[in-house]
Amino acid sequence: MKMWLTVLAALLIASAIIPVHAETTINVTVDGALLITYEFKDLNQTVYDQARTQFTANKVPEAIVSTLQQKNQTVQWGLPPEPLVFEDASRTIRSSFFLGGSRIVSLSIDKTQFKRTYEVKTDWRRFKVDLTDTYSIDFAQYVGTPVAEWQKPDETTFFFENPETEAEHVAFYIKVPASASGVRASGDTVFFDMPPTLEDQFLYSPFPVLAALAVILVIILLYRRVR
């Protein structure tokens, strides 16, 4: 009798385990701040139904912020007009948000070569998020490879894909502006150059100063003529 009870208990436990093999695609667009979209695709029906009531638009950015705060690092985040989308037919959740601040994106201006150089930190991607009370994803396990070792399918995109043999299939894209040049990575930091803005040209170019001196000279000459 005890043996049958043991077998029954084992069967009940096995039936309660939810087999999950999900696919996550992350797109990061760099434009001043980062526009980030996490797309959880083809979720188990049970997980998806639970996430419908338990997963919110704040879940992912708050998980990132919480992880960074443990390292005494502060960032800013916000939500776009449509931050959270549920697609019932494909059991897909799409979560979008902005991430920024000097801890994430910093800028320096090279006055000699007359260009803007951006520095984008990407180590924030290593965090754990709960989609439901019973299902979570630890991205530190799947996207820990330094960005410098990622693929570059084109000049302005970094791409990483973990082995499909793992429980979670993760594809991660980081895209810098199409007009960027000198796109490179060192460790988990992405660097790229951009042309100077009109403000930069005005502030750092010698021509406005020369033009101002020329105007002053003309004013002096006219003043002397009048006298």
Image (tube, grey):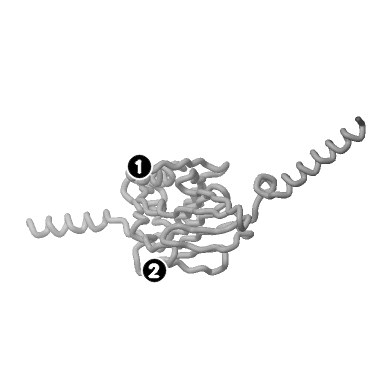
Above or below, 184 relative to 79: below
Question: Residue 167, percent across and down?
Answer: 34, 63
Q: Which badge, 2 or 1, is on the more N-terminal residue?
A: 1
State whether residue 80 appears in this view: yes
**Residue 81 image position (x, y, % from top left):** 57, 41
Instruction: Kindly identify the amino acid type of the residue bearing the numbered disc 2.
Output: Glu
- Residue furthest to the left: 1
Find disc 2 in the rendering and name its residue.
164
- The quarter in which the C terminus is drawn is top right
User: Residue 36, percent across and down?
Assistant: 50, 51
Residue positioned 56% across, 48% down in the render: 32
Q: Residue at x 42, y 46 (%)?
A: 60
Report the mark closest to the observer, 2 or 1. 1
Would you say 179 lies left or right of 147 here? right
- Which secondary structure lies at badge 2? loop
Whole-percent x and y of residue 95? 48, 48
Q: Which residue is mark 1?
A: 72
Q: Residue furthest right?
A: 226
